[in-house]
Amino acid sequence: MIRILIVEDKASMARMLHQLFASKGHEVTVASDGAEAQAKIQSADFHLVITDLKMPNGDGLQVLQAAKSKSPGTIVLIMTAFGTIENAVEAMRLGAFDYLLKPFSIAEVELKVEKALEQQRLQAENAYLKETIRTGFGRLIGSSEAMQEVYGFIQKVAPSAAPVLILGESGVGKELVARAIHDTGPRADRPFIAVNCAALSEGLIESELFGHERGAFTGAVTQNKGRFELADGGTLFLDEIAELSPALQAKLLRVLQEGEYERVGGHQTLRVDVRVIAATHRDLAREIGAGRFREDLYYRVNVLSITVPPLRERPDDLPPLVGHFLSKTAEAMHKPVTIAPEVLALLQCYGWPGNIRELENVIERAVVLTDGPAIRATDLPKEITGLSGEAARAFGDQSLPLDEKMARLEREAIRQTLEAVEWNQTQAARLLGIKRSSLQYKMKRYGLQR
C-alpha cells in the first residue's frame, strides 16, 4: 500500500486531497503545519509527501529536507502559489520531484502524483536490479568479480541488435548468458530459439536453420519453417558455431549481411529480423588459420564478444552454485539433504574441467546416492575426492572434529598439488593460492617431503 503524507494548513484543501487519494486505496496521513509534518516523518515511512511551501511552524523546504534526510527515496511534491514559484524551483533543486501551482485541478494533481509514484517505483526497481546484479543475473549465479564483468557486458549490449559472440569452455553457461542478453533487451517478448550446431548432421542442420519446401528431399512431405523464421523478431542462439561446414557458413553470412535466405528446395527469398548470438569453445583465430572457419563470418559474428570465465577462476561462486543445484535436485526428488562444510571444501579443491555442467551432475549424483541427511565424501566421484586411504577414513569417521577433518583434507590437497607439479614448490604455491613460505611451513607441519 502506498503511504502518502499531505502537509497543508488549509483544512478544506487537506480534506479534499485526503479524500482523493484515500479513495484510490492509498494510506493517507495529514499534517497541518511544518512542525507536525516533521514529527510524522520521523515516526513513519512515506512513499510520497505533498507539502505546501508557505505555512506556519516551518515551511515546505524544511519538510522536504526532513523527508529526504529520513529516506532519500521519498518523493516530495511542492504546492505553491504563483508569487512563490521561485521558491518552488529552489525546492526542486534541493530534491523535490515537481511542484503544483495553486489553484490546481484534480486531474492535474492526479497526473503529478501518478508520475511521482512511477518515479518511486523505478527507483525501487533500479535498487533491486543493482542488488540482483551483485549476486546473480537472470538464471546466472555468482557474485565474483569475473561474473560482475559478465553482468555489466549483458546490460551494455542487451539494448542493441548487433551480433554477439560468446566464448568460453564447454559447460560454463554460454547459453544462459545469451538468454540473459535476450531477456534484458527489447526483444524479450519475442522468441528465443537455440540451435546446437554440433548436435545436428550437416544435411539436417541446413533444413533446421532455413527450413525446407515440400518435396525438397526424401521425407519432406510438408513445408517446414526453419529456426531463422521461427525466431523472426527475436533472438537466434547458435551454439558451437565453429562446427558449421564452410557451405553453411557462407549461407549464414548472407543472412547476417542481407537479412534474407531461401528455404531448402525453395526459390522464394524470405526476409527476417533476427538478432544472432553465437557461441563456441574453440579458438576461432586458430580455426581461421586452419581454413575451417571463414574470416569474413568471424568479423560478422564478432561485433560484440565476451568470454565467460571457467568455474575454477571463480571459486567464490561455487558455494552458491552448490546451494542452488542442491536445492533444485532435493526438491525434485523430495529428498531434503544438506552438504557438510568439509565436503564443500572438497568440491572447492577440484578443478572442474566440465565447469558448471559437471558441478550440476555431481550434485545430482550425490543427492541420489546419499542415504543420510547430508552429502558425504563417499557420495562424490573418486576423481573429485582423490582421497588417500587416511583422508577417506577421516571423512567417514564421525567422531573426528571438523578442524581435524579439514586439516587432513588440506594435507591431501597439498600432497596432490605437489605431485602434479613434480614437487616444484613455486608452482604448487601458485596453484594453491598461497605464498611459497606458507607452503613450506605447511609441508613441514604435515610431514610432506618428496
Image (cartoon, rainbow, N blue to C red):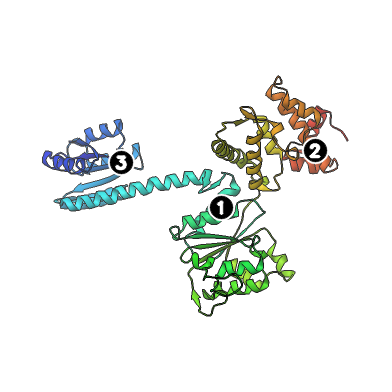
Residue 401 found in image quarter: top right
Which residue corresponds to mark 3?
47
Q: Is residue 294 left or right of residue 141?
A: right
Taking the image as shown, residue 430 lies to the left or right of residue 168, namely right
Does the image show residue 216? yes
Separation (CA) of disc 1 from disc 3: 36 Å
Q: Secondary structure at mark 2?
A: helix
* Mark sitting earlier along the chain (2/1): 1
Residue 76 sits in quarter: top left
Asked whether the beta carbons under mark 3 and mark 2 sit within 8 Å of each other, the answer is no
Name the residue: 17% across, 37% down. Answer: 56
Q: Secondary structure at mark 3?
A: loop
Quarter of the image with the C terminus in it: top right
Examine the image and state in which quarter residue 254 appears: bottom right
Position of 295 with respect to 386 (left or right) is left
Q: Nearer the viewer, residue 43 or 62?
A: 43
Give x and y (percent) for residue 166: 60, 59
Distance from the alpha carbon under mark 2 to that under mark 1: 34 Å
Residue 124, above or below 338: below
Label 2 neighbourhood size at 10 Å, few (<14), some (14-19), many (20+)? Answer: some
Residue at which label 2 appears: 416
> Which of label 2 and label 1 is nearer to you?
1
Residue matched to label 1: 176
